[in-house]
Amino acid sequence: MIDSTRRGLVATGLAAVSAAGMAAQPAQAAPALDLSDGKKRLLAFMRLRGSLDQALVAGCISGRYYGVVGAEVRPLYGVTASTFARYRELPDGRFEGFTYEVAYFTDLETGKVMDRWANPYTGETVDVPHTFSKPARVVIGEDLTIKAEPAIPGLQIRHATLSPLIIGQDLWWTEEVLTEAQIPGMAKPLNYSELVTFQTSVAELAANNTRRVTCRNAYTSVVNWRPWLKMGDAPGHLMGNGAGAWGVAMKDLPAAWLEATKARHPDVLADPGAKLEPLWRKA
């Protein structure tokens, strides 16, 4: 009985010493984020935008479009969009990506995808088109400029990735995309400008032990009146605003998007990567 008690005291004492020793150890500092050269910046950026293991990555954004006439801003309709992309490194160190988007416009009241919409500016009810973009190839170099290759006829793109903003343990990285396209039937070119900001944890990005990192995003856009609005030469333009994430599981994509895609493009839900496969194999 005494021996048993002694052993218990010794064990307790050893445990206490061990715990004290562990407590005395200094906490390991989080690794510093190294963006000192172009290659390191490119690899960090690709872990936000895609995945270094060539896996298919889904991203989504949901938000609203507003009409802007002078200083008056009017909510018009919602938008929900999902993008699918795969990236891989080229022999020259750049990355090539293959991507497409499926986007819908939604009713402000119900949040449901709509096919007809009453334009409050004109009083006319118009048909609502939706976007299923053709899969495209892009190339990203160490300057973080994204270029469509081959270039898309009739489309001019000015793209820049701004310097990242770091506050504490949060990082924001913004892409600036300014486009101009000549659309058949439009007297003037269609201008679409977009700012997309990716947000992640500095510690997660600095750890550099994963193929991709958790990434949220927000966007703001400015675009001419879209042709389907039938605004003619009326003054004003559209402004878009929304938020979402990259690296989203299919089941976690926006509910309105999933519902509409199940009805209109069930093949996308069944195999979202299939649309990219021909380009992926051909390149």
Image (cartoon, rainbow, N blue to C red):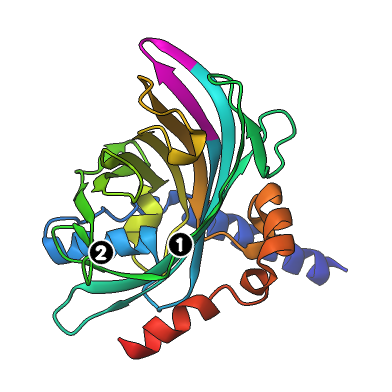
- Chief secondary structure of the magenta portion: strand
| Label placed on residue 152 | 2
Q: Residue at x 33, y 71 (%)?
A: 97
Q: Position of residue 26 (x, y in %)?
A: 38, 50
Q: Is residue 113 left or right of residue 81?
A: right
Instruction: Point out which mark residue 26 bears.
Output: none
Q: Tell me, yes or no, if residue 229 can be seen here.
A: yes
- Work out which residue is located at the far top of the displayed protein and give it: 71
Q: Position of residue 244 (x, y in %)?
A: 52, 45
Crowdedness of circle 2 by 10 Å Cα count: few (<14), some, many (20+)?
A: few
Quadrant of the snapshot with the N terminus:
bottom right
Residue under the image location 35 percent in, 52 percent down: 30
Local SS, label 2: loop
Most extreme residue toward the bottom is 281
Label 2 amino acid?
A: Ile
Q: Which residues are magenta?
A: 64-73
Q: Is residue 26 visible?
A: no
